[in-house]
Image (tube, coloured by chain):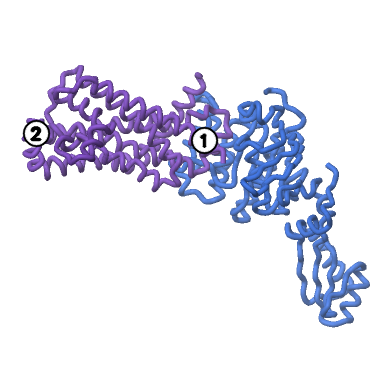
Amino acid sequence: MSSTPEISIAAKRLRKSYGDKVVLDGIDLTVRAGTIFSLLGPNGAGKTTTVQILSTLIRPDGGTARVEGHDLGRAPDAVRTAIGVTGQFAAVDRLLTGEENLLLMADLHHLDRARGRRRTAELLERFDLVEAAKRLPATYSGGMRRRLDLAMTLVGSPQLIFLDEPTTGLDPRSRQTMWEIIRELADSGVTIFLTTQYLEEADQLANRIAVLHNGKLAAEGGPDELKRLIPGGHVRLRFADEHALLAAMRLLGHSVRGEDGLSLRVPSDCRVRSLRMLLDELDDAGVEAEEFSVNTPDLNDVFFALTDSKREVLSA
Amino acid sequence: MRDSIHDSVTMLRRNLLHARRYPSMTISTVAMPVLMLLLFVGVFGGALGTGIGGASYIGSYVDYVAPGIILMAATSGSVATAVSVSVDMTEGIVNRFRTMAISRSSVLTGHVIGGVIQTMVSIALVVGVALLMGFRPTAGPLDWLGAFGLLLAMTFAMTWLAAAFGLVSKGPESASNAPMPLMFLPMLGSGFVPPERMPGAVRWFAEHQPFTPIIETLRGLLMGTPLVGGTGALALGWCALIALIGFLWARRAFSRAVAR
């Protein structure tokens, strides 16, 4: 138990069906210890089912997996001592205060009273819940409840944490906070298995991303590898007259003229830096655009790309 | 084994904290038998007492009906367990427990022991109200101990059954309804009137249903009424059977509910 294996999760040919519906159709996963691995996919792709299998909540119909060095089927309790799970719906006790929830976890992890109190105080502090400690979760905001949920998961100091859509339904500010927390956790050496339906989230956080589509892995790779599979984002510029348009075309090189004759589609990774460079370039040349819009590739683009073009699977 | 006791105690503490924080459930489970007591002794008592007087029982009606209503408190108390188990299952917290290395059974054990403690407190309150209303048991200390033991066995059995109801019901509302029919079983037994005064089929049912020997035994212990031989054993047998069914059903429903 004390040895930390280099591979946190090694799953082979995981399968799960509910009646006629195949939810997971034989997926292989390898997650290296100390990294953030993101399983990306739309609702119903099988993300939660994967988390449920790997966290011992349900048994797969087929396939095997080792989690933190323990066989999922044969030693589920050994797996449980090494993992922590924070699901999509806050798993907090609504009739206990935030503090009592954490103390309950401390008791269940068999921490002695003094250590349990210390750990609780530490986590309340770290997750900015000190003021809310004596209140029931019903009075919490969505972000606070999610933080409490994660704090409860951390009481037992797990080596591997499953985060099932940790930011779904959160406002942008709470999402940022959650991202910072996840990064800090990863920095402290914890392995993180993150599911999300936001490409941006996976891109921001993950070392490695696997795209789940219809129960199969449509692609897997680092964020940059994956983005190369996506038909690019682009910037759309609209000009007052043809003169400006032609000037911009000469300036920017590979751009495509739009159907209305006065707009340009310029491929871009849509990052702030490159957008600023593009605008500066136009500015310096004295070319003025009337309209400017950014079209980032979203998950739909990824899926269209991956499912239309015969599933170009990157080797892991 | 030590871990599983440790975890069960933790879960028990959690459930007792719930009961303290959310007392309306406990209050309503006590209110029901107390209302029955007020209704049947204060309102119908005169008429019913006269009717019964002619049959096998001589004495005031409160002495006849109190054991049945005390038993109702055991059933009524189990509603709280059905609801709290059901609430747990509809929320994410049970899934969290299941991904932790804790003894699985501790979740249910905590609910059941917590439920038994709460119900025994309710029963004590109902006994208190009955005494205030003129209930005059003739029991000696040993009889009281026996009555306590019987009520404990009955409560234990009903609480396991209620836990199973809570697990199989769709939500807290239906969980709170599930034990209702059981609450009225004492009426179709010897709880409120002697079965020999009931019509044919109802009488047969009243004489053979589990609550009748339990009520008779309780009445025998508290009021010293004569018992047909073997009634006490039959009462304990029913408690054991209900407890076993409830336990096995709950255990099965629990592993099924969590293995979706």
Say whether residue A139 is left or right of residue B130. Answer: right
- Residue B65's label in the rendered image is none
| SS of the residue under disc 2 | loop
Q: Mark 2, chain letter?
A: B
Residue at 72%, 27% in the rendered image: A69
Which residue is denoted by mark 1 in the rendering?
Answer: A102
- The chain displayed blue equals A
Please say if A162 is above or below A214: above
- The chain displayed purple equals B
Q: Position of residue A107 (x, y in %)?
A: 50, 28
| SS of the residue under disc 1 | helix
Which residue is denoted by mark 2 in the rendering?
Answer: B55
Q: Nearer the viewer, residue B88 or A142?
A: B88
- Report the amino acid beneath label 2: Ala
Residue at 67%, 34% in the rendered image: A160
Say whether residue B164 is left or right of residue B47. Answer: right
Q: Mark 1, chain letter?
A: A
Say whether residue B230 is left or right of residue A304. Answer: left
